[in-house]
Amino acid sequence: MTYDEIEGRIVRYADLRPCYNAFIDTRSPGSQAKENFTIIGPGVAENPDQFVHITEEHGFNIGGARQPPECVNSQHSHNTAEVFVVHTGDWRFDLGEHGDDAQIVLYPGDVISIPTKIFRGFTNVGTDTGFLWAVLGGDDPGRVLWAPQVFEMAKDYGLVLLENGLLADTAAGDEIPPDVRPMPVTSRQQVEALHRATPEEAQNLVVRDAPGDMAIIGPGAPFDWPHGFTMDRIELAGERYLSDGAAVLFVQSGTVQIAGAAGSSALHPGDTMTVPAAFGDYSLHSESAVVFKVRRSA
Ligand SMILES: [Fe+2]
């Protein structure tokens, strides 16, 4: 691989391109400052202008959310697994239609896996801007199901979600095409079809930051239900050789030198790299670093 080919598979934190109006809730009070990222696509954005850093299919999607203190991501559900790694900040995850079925606070290095068909929202409850790195299952993670009140709030600010899954910004002069209807507000029947988690269940959706290596998602791991991908935490103190094929790496902390026969590069906190199978065996080197590794599973 050439230098450019290797660099082209790295999405550096400093180069992340945010979308400020990826979703229907992004103009509602408390949510306007939310930045959404699609790192490995296509993601679930409702705005076709959302920039996708790497479009190649991986069997899962990688995204991110960056929010200042008190900024809210509204209650929604997915038909695929949704996993968050807390890179920076303190975050409260609220489960349920109104976010009051269960609440749990996560800190840097913690991981939460929210199963399909549960309403979830999250708020930065820390004192600094925070970044969540997210993995959604599948090549096509489908669309977001919003809690009914999210539609009500958005209407007041000119954003209308259409039946085709895209947003019309009527405040910015978008017209609703005559042949496309607005997305119907989520019905009581749809709400009642979702699972409601208890506070005890919510505790079991979190793996807390802890020193050392750990399998987080996969057979025998704390999250052993099907996700479509596996996740491992790797703690580096020196050199580590990996020979398990294609993987996506996320640097939680530290600076990591990745080197293979094809070349090498340095990765910094918040950087994502998709290592292709063609990269072959490789090594990771750092005096002190934590890396999360995601691989497609059968
Ligand atoms: Fe989500």
Image (spheres, grey):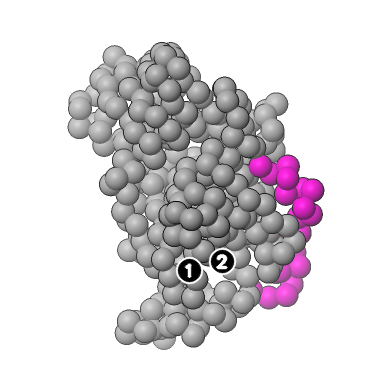
Which SS class for mark 1?
loop
Of residue 61 and residue 133, the one placed in the foreground of this image is: 133
294 inside magenta stretch: no
197 inside magenta stretch: yes
Please state the horizontal and vertical placement of residue 150, each as a whole percent of the image: 57, 74
Instruction: Locate residue 96 relative to residue 129 in the image: left or right.
Output: right
- The magenta segment is 186-206
Residue contact between numbered discs 2 and 1, judged by CB atoms under 8 Å:
yes
**What mark, if any, has residue 261 been given in the picture?**
none
Q: Residues within 10 Å of mark 1 (few under 14, many from 20)?
A: many
From where the camera sits, is residue 81 visible? Answer: no
Instruction: Locate residue 194 relative to residue 90 in the image: left or right.
Output: right
Q: Residues within 10 Å of mark 2 (few under 14, many from 20)?
A: many
Rendered residue at 40%/19% (across/down): 287
Q: Earlier in the sequence, mark 2 or mark 1?
A: 1
Residue under label 1, please give it: 31
Instruction: Locate residue 217 relative to residue 89 in the image: left or right.
Output: right
Please state the horizontal and vertical placement of residue 6, each as a whole percent of the image: 27, 29
Give the distance between the C-alpha atoms of the residues marked 2 and 1, in whole angstroms: 8 Å
Quarter in which the N terminus is drawn:
top left
Which SS class for mark 2?
strand
From where the camera sits, is residue 183 visible? Answer: yes
Residue under label 2, please give it: 74
Rendered residue at 60%/65% (across/down): 75
Please state the horizontal and vertical placement of residue 78, each as a whole percent of the image: 60, 57
Of residue 26 and residue 72, the one placed in the foreground of this image is: 72
As drawn, 243 above or below 79: above
Quarter in which the C terminus is drawn:
top right
Rendered residue at 50%/83% (across/down): 155
Which residue type does callout 2 highlight? Ser
